């Protein structure tokens, strides 16, 4: 069932959904295949870890400038160009590996280029959503996008990437290139102008330098209590979550007695919850409200850390990860929909990319922090720290997300663009 048939979101969104979902599958294949390729060439832990570092570094360097680019250009054309550049880069890498000439250095260069493009592609696709989807359908649209990405990247890409790598080291990268090529075709089939609209006064006051435009986006976000708080939460909670997941493989072996298959199934539990939360998210949010979706989600986050810190039961930990996955799917829907409702069209790219930047920063800090805490204070230390942080941020932000504040975001006239008619 396509989004057009099952969700009533229109042909333009169906094409955008298919493009981003295919892109997520391709990116997931590269995520799995890259460390496998490096490990097949060297057993140096620093070089192997370099694959992850090269993948994350562009998010810190280019997320904010990428948002400016998204707000300056036609977002549809920008996505097409990015996909075509990534197709070319991955085709070169796949050809080199298949011919026996590919090395780790070339892989790192291509990973850096592809992930730089991913930042801009993701911000542009998020900025397009309020253009192709009516305001009252944003929750459903974001649920479909989140669910598709989780299904492809977190559930299918892992086993498929491993299978393709076993066939040939270059195969996952070649298939990745094909997914980006198909994504470009689908985006090209979306009609309409997707350049950010702005009135003459706003355009006249817009800073001309990239730095000035980044500051403009950051200043606007800093003056929005709901969006500012959600951005800070994303950063803080990503620190503790990534710290927890960074040493989960050790916890799974030492405390739960799981092997590699059982460890992988823990992530399957989380991904399954994520898909379920994404697909049912708009109905759940409508029933319990966005306010309680956020508040309950913060409690679920605390519950996950408590279960990982205190339980030796695989079932309890698996259920906690499943519940966290549901929360993650719902959180993505609420945060993206609120941002799209409240952000002016000419700032959509910069505000989206700021959230990506904050999230990436949290991931980088968390990966380092998890190892340090576990090494110094024991394997459960990252989870106890995560529990304290989750309880603290829940208490500190509980009143920020009160019903009246969130209701105003849903009730006030939206600054987002009107949907573009598509034949």
Image (tube, helix red, strand yellow):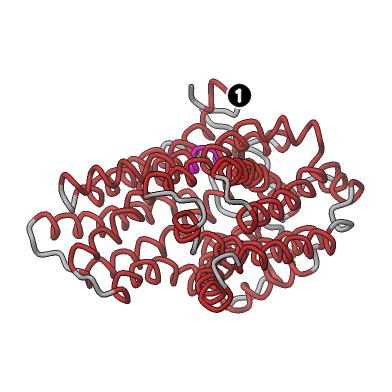
Q: Identify the residue at horizontal 33%, vertical 40% (top origin).
A: 182
Q: Identify the residue at horizontal 31%, vertical 45% (top origin).
A: 181
| Residue 373 colored in magenta in the image | no
Dot 1 alpha-carbon crowd within 10 angstroms: few under 14, some 14 to 19, many 20 or more:
some
Instruction: Residue 350: give x, y in percent of width and height.
Output: 61, 63
Q: Residue at label 1?
A: 8
Which quadrant would residue 64 be assigned to in this image? bottom right
Residue nearest the viewer, comparing 77 with 288: 288
Q: Which contiguous range is marked in magenta?
A: 145-150
> In this rendering, would 26 be left or right of 21?
left
Total tally of numbered discs in the picture: 1
Secondary structure beneath label 1: loop
Which quadrant would residue 110 be assigned to in this image? bottom left
Residue nearest the viewer, comparing 80 with 278: 278
Q: Identify the residue at horizontal 62%, vertical 63% (top origin).
A: 383
Q: Which residue extends farthest left?
A: 99
**Majority SS type along the magenta span:** helix
Instruction: Residue 35: give x, y in percent of width and height.
Output: 30, 61
Residue 131 visible within the image: no
Instruction: Residue 225: give x, y in percent of width and height.
Output: 82, 62
Q: Which residue extends farthest right?
A: 404
Considering only vertical position in the picture, is 361 above or below 194? below
Which quadrant would residue 365 be assigned to in this image? bottom right
């Amino acid at each position: 069932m396509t989004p057009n048939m099952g969700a009533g979101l229109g042909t333009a969104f169906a094409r955008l959904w298919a493009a981003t979902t295919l892109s997520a599958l391709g990116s997931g294949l590269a995520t799995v295949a890259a460390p496998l390729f490096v490990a097949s060439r060297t057993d140096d832990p620093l070089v192997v870890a370099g694959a992850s570092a090269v993948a994350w570094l562009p998010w810190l360097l280019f997320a904010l400038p990428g948002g400016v680019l998204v707000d300056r250009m036609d977002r549809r054309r920008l996505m097409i160009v990015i996909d075509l550049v990534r197709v070319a880069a991955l085709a070169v890498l796949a050809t080199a590996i298949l011919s026996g000439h590919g090395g780790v250095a070339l892989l790192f260069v291509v990973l850096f280029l592809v992930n730089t493009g991913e930042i801009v592609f993701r911000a542009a696709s998020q900025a397009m959503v309020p253009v192709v989807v009516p305001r009252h359908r944003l929750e459903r649209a974001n649920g479909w996008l989140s669910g598709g990405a989780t299904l492809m990247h977190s559930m299918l890409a892992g086993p498929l990437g491993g299978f393709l790598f076993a066939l040939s080291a270059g195969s996952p990268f070649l298939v990745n290139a094909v997914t980006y090529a198909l994504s470009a075709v689908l985006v090209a089939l979306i009609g309409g102008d997707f350049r950010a609209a702005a009135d003459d006064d706003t355009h006249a006051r817009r800073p001309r330098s990239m730095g000035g435009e980044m500051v403009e986006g950051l200043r606007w976000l800093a003056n929005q209590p709901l969006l500012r708080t959600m951005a800070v939460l994303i950063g803080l909670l990503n620190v503790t979550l990534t710290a927890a997941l960074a040493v989960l493989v050790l916890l799974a072996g030492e405390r739960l007695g799981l092997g590699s298959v059982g460890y992988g199934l823990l992530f399957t539990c989380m991904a399954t919850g994520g898909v379920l939360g994404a697909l049912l998210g708009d109905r759940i949010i409508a029933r319990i409200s966005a306010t309680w979706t956020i508040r309950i989600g913060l409690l679920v986050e605390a519950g996950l850390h408590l279960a990982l810190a205190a339980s030796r039961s695989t079932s309890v930990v698996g259920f906690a990860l499943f519940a966290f996955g549901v929360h993650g799917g719902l959180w993505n829907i609420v945060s993206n929909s609120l941002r799209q409702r409240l952000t002016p069209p000419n700032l959509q790219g910069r505000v989206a990319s700021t959230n990506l930047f904050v999230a990436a920063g949290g991931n980088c800090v968390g990966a380092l922090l998890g190892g340090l805490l576990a090494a110094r204070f024991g394997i459960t230390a990252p989870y106890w720290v995560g529990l304290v942080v989750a309880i603290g941020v829940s208490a500190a932000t509980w009143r920020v997300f009160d019903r009246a504040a969130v209701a105003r975001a849903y009730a006030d006239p939206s600054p987002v663009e009107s949907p573009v008619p598509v034949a």
